[in-house]
Amino acid sequence: MLRHSLRTAAVLLLLMAAGCTSPVAPRSTVYGPIEPDIPRRIYVTTNGEREAILTYLELAGFSIESDPRNATFVLAVQLGSKRDTRDCGAVRNVTYALSHSGVLIARIVGRGRFGRCSPNILSQMSQELARLFSR
């Protein structure tokens, strides 16, 4: 009986740990209208991986501004701690929070691999953000 309980507990812990490292496709919530006619000039704030984020945003059709006064949108990118790490990159939670004129208008959350891994969560998140402009 005790062996069975220990085995069950070990399996549950393994499943919980695996659940925190499995990819989660980006999910978006839109809080306000996103006008497709407004130029896609974005100022980005982030707690890491800045160059990779900017690269994927540019590939998705956004223009990056270095001065927030020149941007039409502010994108706050929050990266969670590294989880499962492999040769190509680590799994992390990612949140994109898009604001226009100081008002939060959309949030995208996802989890996936960074670095050279494919699929790459930063690419997926940036494509999802671009999709919001085409609604």
Image: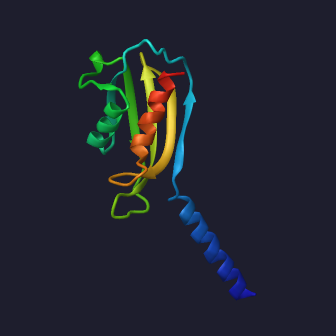
Which residue is at a point 33% across and 64% down the rendered structure image? 87
**Of 51 and 37, the residue lying toward us:** 37
In the rendered image, the residue lying farthest to the right is: 1
The quarter of the rendered structure image containing the N terminus is bottom right
In-front residue for pair 87/105:
87
Query: Residue 90, position in %: x, y?
Result: 38, 57
Vertical relation: 60 (above or below) 39: below
Above or below 111: residue 96: above
Residue extending furthest toward the top: 37
Q: Residue at x 31, y 31 (%)?
A: 58
Q: In the image, is 64 to the left or to the right of 102?
A: left
Number of numbered discs: 0
Give the image location of residue 28, x and y in percent: 55, 34
- In the image, residue 112 above or below residue 122: below
Is 123 on the left or on the right of 35, as rendered? left
Say which quarter of the image contains residue 83. Answer: bottom left
Left-right relation of 9 to 70: right
Residue 97's x, y, as percent?
Answer: 45, 32
